């Protein structure tokens, strides 16, 4: 699916509703902006929505965020489809984003990407059958001196080799955070 297209067939089964804790966080965030400028909280609220609703943004979730911010749904879609940091499809428990810009490519990110695809039996944009891993490419993750590298959540994994990839996959599979 193209990043600029919102697939209306991808839906959550129920109307999303933030937990009381997350709604309090959202309301505090909105209150930190001047009156009439609540849209400024949109990106952070989309991150909160991804955390709360399974790691991705369905149409219902984006509509819910628009309702909270009192803006048009298209305004949410525009932001969610523009930034590659948002997932518009269901993703695995761990999302591997492999940098594929110049410095990482020169250092072998293409080989690492091929190896991960082979190892996990998925292609870029796909999720493993067990729902554990999703593989994506990323534009410059700002670690050019440590290439090739991938990001999983908030963790960077640098100076990748096939052996290091094996260790990373094994650690995430076992529920550990890789060293």
Image: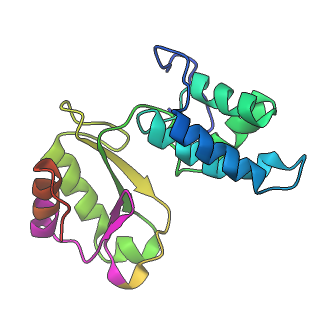
Instruction: Tell me the magenta residue range.
Output: 146-166
Residue 154 sits inside the magenta stretch: yes
Q: Position of residue 103 (x, y in %)?
A: 42, 77
Quarter of the image with the C terminus is bottom left
Count the marks: how many? 0
Rendered view: 66 above or below 157: above
Q: Is residue 34 visible?
A: yes
- Outermost residue on the right side: it is 36
Residue 4 sits inside the magenta stretch: no
Viewer-nearest residue: 178 or 97: 178
Q: Position of residue 151 (x, y in %)?
A: 36, 62
- Residue at 24 percent across and 63 percent down: it is 111
Q: Seen in the image, is 6 located left or right of residue 19? A: right
Q: Position of residue 74 (x, y in %)?
A: 76, 31
Q: Position of residue 171 (x, y in %)?
A: 13, 58
Viewer-nearest residue: 103 or 81: 81
């Amino acid at each position: 699916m193209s990043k600029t297209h919102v697939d209306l067939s991808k839906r959550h089964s129920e109307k999303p509703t933030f937990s009381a804790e997350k709604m309090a966080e959202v309301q505090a965030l909105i209150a930190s902006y001047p009156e009439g400028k609540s849209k400024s909280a949109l990106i952070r609220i989309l991150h909160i929505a991804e955390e709360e609703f399974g790691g991705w943004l369905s149409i219902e979730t984006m509509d819910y965020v628009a309702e909270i911010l009192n803006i048009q749904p298209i305004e949410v879609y525009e932001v969610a489809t523009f930034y590659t940091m948002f997932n518009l499809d269901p993703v695995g428990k761990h999302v591997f984003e492999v940098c594929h810009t110049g410095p990482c490519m020169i250092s072998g990110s293409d080989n690492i990407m091929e190896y991960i695809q082979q190892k996990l039996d998925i292609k870029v944009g796909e999720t493993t059958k067990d729902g554990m891993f999703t593989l994506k490419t990323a534009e410059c993750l700002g670690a050019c001196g440590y290439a090739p590298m991938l990001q999983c959540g908030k963790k960077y994994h640098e100076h990748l080799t096939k052996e290091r990839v094996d260790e990373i996959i094994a650690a995430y599979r076992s529920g550990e955070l890789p060293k």
